[in-house]
Amino acid sequence: MAPHLIPTEGHVVGLVDLGTNSVRLLVVRINTNRSYTILNQHKVMVRLGEGEFVKQRLRQEAMERTILVLRRFADMARNLGAEEIYAVATSATRDAENRDVFIERVRKEADIDLKVISGLEEARLIYLGVASGVHLGSRNALFIDIGGGSTELVVGNRSEYSYLDSLKLGCIRLSNIFFLPDEEAPVDDQRYALLQQFIRNASLRSVQRLKESDFDLVLGSSGTIETLAEVAQRAAGKGKRRDEEGDPVVTIDQIESAVRLIRTTPLSERCRIPGMDAERADVILPGAAILHTLMQDLELREIRVCSRSLKNGLLVDYLMRGTYGGYLEPEMSVREQSVLQLGRSCGFDEEHSRHIADLCLGLFDSAALLGLHALGAQERELLYYAALLHDVGLFLSFSNHQAHSFYIIRNVELLGFHAQEIATIASAAFYHRKRAPKKTDPEFALLDAASAKTVRVLSMFLRMAESMDRSHQRFVERVEFRRKGNVLLLDIRGVSGCQLEIWSLEEHIKPFSKLFGERFAIRVDPQDRPVPA
């Protein structure tokens, strides 16, 4: 789009997908008329995971070239008016022992706050990206995405998924394990059989579950599958078969023929195979083996190949959150669904948790209006989720249940969140009882500086809210900060007889003053509602 045609109103965001093989940029303007405009998009193959999966460490040269591309992508996005850059990293970064070093370098050298997502979150975003661009109607589909470090499998329809999985199988990962760099010789039957057996062992559990699932078609995404489909269709020599939407469709027979052609061709000649992407020629065989093996074991006759990917899923996910007038308005966000699913699975007191969340938001919002803190909508949302989940540790025991809550939240792979958001929610929940965070606490030491500052504020509000509903009877109905002259008041609307809650709340005056530099006085506006029996 020419610069003079780009709308001047709206919110511009740069979305970055950093994979094991490639990095992708999508710059989008979220328009005020509830539409969006793609301003630019780029993809560069950086091979971040090259040589990683033997020692589980990102190599220096791979980090250098990736950071260079990320820095240029950030400049492109900001030159187009991007007010924020949302970047996620997948398998290569997720599995690397030195990932923190890499993330910090990206922050300092490219000015990008890179978020590491789980395998299940990667699968969910791929599903969103592909399902949002395919007309499924009433059909269920199996989604297969083969990346450089992992393979994601999803079963879902046009509006929701019923199965998510992420396998530690990818074209670069398996190339690192099975082949030497620049290995020239063709791959014989015996060696290919060993490669397939490795894949079968790693995918056994998923294959068993997928055999019990109901789906009407198979959708494949990623550059690996696109390249393989192009090779397969050209090798078939009968023209390209496409579905009603124009996407290529390849059969298991065509895949097997393509695999045979690739593995019997020396590496130096592989890039000359018709349809081959020269940049993928050295790692295409492991990726082809993954698809071939899955199609064999699941008895799939054909696969439809889609060009959409996780990058598109990032956009759909961003629009679903609706912060800047995005056009998607689901009844409930994936994040809230995921949080409530966890809470309900742990048998939490939903009425109490929602009341605590309401009190927390009353404290957060009124404190923000008075300038007590400068946190925004994102931190407010995390406080809401921390309040909903603060007591899930009771599922294990009352004693030390805040520690149990922390452990559960950190380890269940909440969907829709990146790693630092999950850490923030978990830490805020950990400090919902008795005391404020300390630098020496292991749970607090896991946070970066910005998140640590956020947790201090969020956990303060959460402890105060918990004190106001100690009995789980909702004696305190509403709360907000006000100023009367030079006095900071905490106005409480509650029933007569909420003295226990007031006494408990008074314990927070000193730590509140230490955090915000100001003491508050409590003013109660009692209502006529009788104290519950």
Image: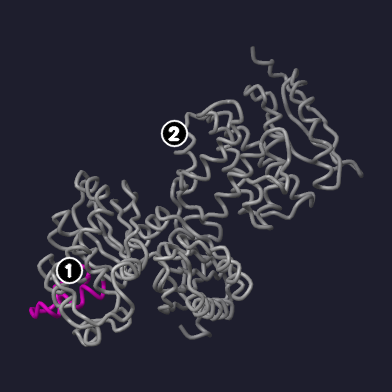
| C-alpha separation, residue under disc 2 versus residue under disc 1 | 40 Å
Establish if 339 lies above or below 326: above
The quadrant of the image that shows the C terminus is top right
**Residue 301 — which label?**
none
Residue 228 belongs to magenta span? yes
Number of residues whose C-alpha sits closer than 10 Å to that of mark 1, classed few (under 14), some (14–19) or many (20 or more): many
Q: Amino acid at mark 1?
A: Val
Compare marks 2 and 1 and give the one earlier in the sequence. Answer: 1
Q: Which residue is mark 2?
A: 345
Establish if 239 lies above or below 365: below
The region drawn magenta spans: 226-247
Residue 458 belongs to magenta span? no
Spot the residue most to the top: 533
Q: Between tags 2 and 1, which lies in front?
A: 2
- Residue lying at 31% horizontally and 70% vertically, measured from the top left: 175
Spot the residue most to the right: 486
Q: Which residue is mark 1?
A: 249
SS for callout 2: helix
| Residue 273 point in image, percent of width and height | 19, 84
501 displayed left or right of 333: right
